[in-house]
């Protein structure tokens, strides 16, 4: 049954993760009076001007869409205020100035793809996989000054399978998150929700943004940690290493637990369908890769005609 609550909602978000939440809110009958998303910019092959998934979807539904470059701009804030929103919903957008998040009477609700206070930061889904978590989830909370620290409204959990990647967990949490946000808005409208302060501890794990310096494979890690690292960076931004002085993106691996006396980080191959790197306690088999200047391919295709002094023959 569609929700009949008449909260005037402004939605803020950019990627597909946010777009799905917006769609589900509309399906459930929520009154989204305007959408805020990033400005159009060049991207993809040919660097054509592209809109965010949220912008494209909002326009297809004839919802007013604002695309400010500066959230502190007086004219933008004046226009935002003109929509007379009761509440704002923020999902995968950007940091908001207090003059924006504190504007509506019911404040601003954010959804974070982790079980806060764990994994505060820009990449919670990636880091949950990288760290080998067995459980993950989503949290709705009210925005305040410090990032991802506001009072918790609702949390829901899900399992993390051993073969999950950041991509598959993203999809699980996207579905779970939409249900959680719908429930949160219903209960806010019904005034049947309590805000629970986050409790910090010394055991909090962070989720910093991913850059080149923290996505390179460290072959000194255990094989299980390397496998998790690769899973946690797939399908974006992709873990990498170097082979023959060229950047080697690693999409999929398998860890073989096997004793050996080889130095860590040595490449081995049969030049047919096997390429592996020696690590502590075994080997990381590379299954799908992309060498700088070549296309993404499975190992058997990559090794077809490839030779290198960096590859040791299998003993």
Image (spheres, rainbow, N blue to C red):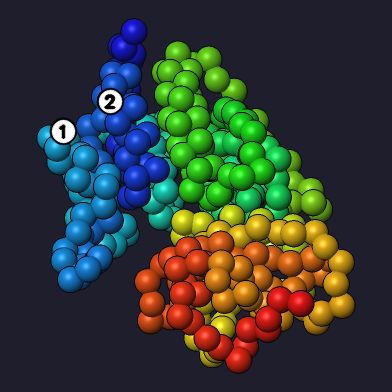
Q: Residues within 10 Å of mark 1 (few under 14, many from 20)?
A: few
Query: Under tag 2, what secondary structure?
Result: helix
Which residue is identified by label 2?
A: 26
Side of 106 where 163 appears, left or right:
right
Q: Tell me residue 38's x, y (percent).
A: 28, 56
Residue count near mark 2 (Cα–Cα under 10 Å), binned few <14, some 14–19, many ≥20: some
Judge from the rendering whether residue 263 lies leftward or rightward of residue 137; answer left or right. right
Image position, residue 307 (x, y; %): 52, 86
Q: Residue at x 31, y 57 (%)?
A: 71
- Vertical relation: 119 (above or below) 314: above
Mark 2–mark 1 Cα distance, whole angstroms, equals: 10 Å
Q: In front here: 260 or 137?
A: 260
Q: Which residue is mark 1?
A: 61
Q: Which of 125 and 70 lies nearest the eye of the viewer?
A: 125
Residue 142's disc number: none
Question: Contact (CB < 8 A) between labels 2 and 1?
Answer: yes
Q: Quadrant of residue 44?
A: bottom left
């Amino acid at each position: 049954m569609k929700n009949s609550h008449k909260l005037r909602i402004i939605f803020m978000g950019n990627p597909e993760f946010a777009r799905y939440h917006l769609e589900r809110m509309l399906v459930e009958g929520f009154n989204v009076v305007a959408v805020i998303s990033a400005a159009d910019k060049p991207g993809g092959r040919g660097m054509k001007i592209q809109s965010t998934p949220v912008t494209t979807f909002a326009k297809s539904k004839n919802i007013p869409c604002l695309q400010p470059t500066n959230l502190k701009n007086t004219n933008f804030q004046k226009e935002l205020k003109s929509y007379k929103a009761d509440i704002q919903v923020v999902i995968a957008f950007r940091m908001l100035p207090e003059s924006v998040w504190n504007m509506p009477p019911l404040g601003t609700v954010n959804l974070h793809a982790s079980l806060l206070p764990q994994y505060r930061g820009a990449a919670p889904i990636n880091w949950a996989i990288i760290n080998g978590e067995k459980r993950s989830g989503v949290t709705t909370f009210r925005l305040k000054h410090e990032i991802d620290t506001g009072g918790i409204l609702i949390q829901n959990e899900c399992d993390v399978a051993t073969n999950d990647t950041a991509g598959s967990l993203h999809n699980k949490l996207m579905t779970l998150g939409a249900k959680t946000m719908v429930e949160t808005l219903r209960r806010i409208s019904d005034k049947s929700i309590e805000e629970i302060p986050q409790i910090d501890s010394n055991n909090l794990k962070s989720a910093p943004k991913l850059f080149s310096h923290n996505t390179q494979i460290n072959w000194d890690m255990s094989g299980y940690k390397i496998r998790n690292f690769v899973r946690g960076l797939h399908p974006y931004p992709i873990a990498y290493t170097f082979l023959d002085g060229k950047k080697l993106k690693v999409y999929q691996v398998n860890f073989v637990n096997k004793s050996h006396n080889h130095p860590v980080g040595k490449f081995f191959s049969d030049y047919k369908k096997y390429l592996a790197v020696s690590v502590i306690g075994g080997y990381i088999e590379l299954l799908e890769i992309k060498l700088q200047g070549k296309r993404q391919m499975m190992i058997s295709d990559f090794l077809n005609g490839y030779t290198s002094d960096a590859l040791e023959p299998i003993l």
